[in-house]
Image (cartoon, rainbow, N blue to C red):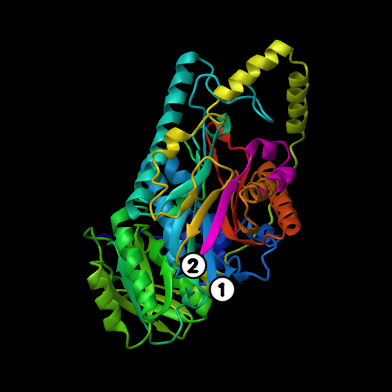
Amino acid sequence: MSADPVVTAELVRRHGLTPEEFDRIKKILGREPNFTELGIFSVMWSEHCSYKNSRKELRKFPTAGPKILVKAGEENAGVVDIGNGWAVAFKMESHNHPSAIEPFQGAATGVGGIIRDIFTMGARPEFCLNSLRFGPITEKCRDTRVGRASDTPATTEDRQKQIAANRRLFTGVVSGIAHYGNCVGIPTIGGEIYFDESFEGNPLVNVFCLGVLRHEQLARGTAEGAGNPVFYVGAETGRDGLAGAAFASRELTQQSREDRPAVQVGDPFKEKLLLEACLELLARGAVAGIQDMGAAGLTCSTCETASRAGSGIEIDLAKVPKREPGMTPYEILLSESQERMLIIARHGKEDVVREVFEKWDVPCAEIGRVTSDGIMRVRNNGQIAAEIPAKALAEEAPLYSREAKKNIAEITEDAEIIRKISALSASSVIESLRQVLRDPTIASKNWVYRQYDHTVRTGTIVKPGSDAAVFFVRYANKILAASTDCNSTYCALDPREGGKIAVAEAARNLTCSGAKPLAVTDCLNFGNPYKPENFWQLREAIEGIAEACRAFGTPVTGGNVSLYNESPAGVVDPTPTIAMVGL
């Protein structure tokens, strides 16, 4: 096995860390990090894991309410009371960058990840929704762009190639969502799809899942109880998804296709077995804490569970199930292989854990224990591979307030578009109406919905295509409604008003379906936050969402921030997607 690279300034830069952040790391450790520790800090302090450029803004959201059982940021998903001792756990996440590189697996693993976030809370997943954005898939789409000139190819041949690329992304993403949801047996019962030039090269793939649980079934992602054993359960660790969190924290470029190893590969049948095994183990009272190995994989699950509990954790990578030989500590810790969980079992319940996972034919290995010193300690065949304070990784990433600058030029161009629309003749209006009705954004989405099994679990009352998805949970005797909404064009014109409109649209959709809005989760899709115009859009949209949520009495239970949504074609239109749940 080759020696680890020497940690140099160039290596630090390639890991996405600034010189100031590297100095902070050295101060935390009291020494220079080794190569493995550098990788750990790189993923945990990435935007994808730490929200270092958005967390200060996210604090503006209303998060408290009489029905909120688990608030935003506390756990893997928000939990809301729905009466009679029942609750719902729900969340929305993005898988934009992976889907741009490998649309089928990128979308499929996005579904798998959000499902795990829900059953990690002790809830049984009941249904999924999605919100998707792609470049135009037909020759004639919108001729004008809000806020800037079109960046799309000028010649007919180039345009046809771009449309073909957009179609490949569209069909791949839809197939990936359908494959994973259908195979794992969770219905996809609604969502939305938009096509616009701003999403060429950088599609948006936002997925939502909701599960139901009893209050007393609520599980926590905490490594509590010094001496409690730590178990790795689920699929073996490979090199797929390596450093995926860091990959999601930078812009897409012409060379991004070389990042295919950063895209995870999913297996929905393994996910189904893992789901049932985890829920059975939780029901048997053998679990002190449970955490999905999502972004940053084993690294994130260990340090986050320890940090939440104020404890430490020690693991031995030699005991981790692997499907590839010769994996280094760096690769094992940063792998984002799918269908894996970390379980902190109660002391004395080790045999119960092994029995349950053997029953479901799911790999299971005891890899460590909880400690009381606050340190995430990683060994490999007895040798120390990494030794870092857990809180420094999970809670003490640097937080920034970036420069925000309103783009005045956009407003001028937007006014010109409005002037052109007002000057249209009657015949032009009729032809424009026909063109609008032919536009894939407006046209029927039956081709998409037919690929989703939206009736599995037999609870679907209102099928895809209506204002909101409506689902009957028989064992709880509750009818739930949910909707995902955002108009990116409105947000490009005015991100604050666009944020308000997204919340209001979701509330209207639920109300028109007979449901009372309860709470929301969001997925904030924006460009590079280091560009002042992009950060201004993010800040304004958050202000608008916060104002609307307070007005409707719908607290934000959590969600996701996806920044760096830019490709060589340009930055995507700001898209703060709202998923609202009602009863």
The residue sitting at 37% across, 57% down in the picture is: 336
- For label 2, count other residues whose C-alpha is less than 10 Å away and answer few (under 14), some (14-19) or many (20+): some
Pointer 1 residue: 84
Amino acid type assigned to the residue bearing label 1 in the image:
Asn
Residue 188 drawn at (x, y percent): 44, 48
Pointer 2 residue: 476
Asked whether 395 or 40 is in front, the reply is 395
Instruction: Evaluate whether residue 38 shows in this view.
Output: no
Residue 11 drawn at (x, y percent): 44, 54
The residue sitting at 54% across, 69% down in the picture is: 87
Q: Along the horizontal axis of the image, is 503 left or right of 152?
A: right
Instruction: Evaluate whether residue 579 shows in this view.
Output: yes
Residue 427 drawn at (x, y percent): 69, 11
Is 496 magenta? The answer is yes
Q: Which quadrant is home to the C terminus?
A: bottom right
Amino acid type assigned to the residue bearing label 2 in the image:
Ala
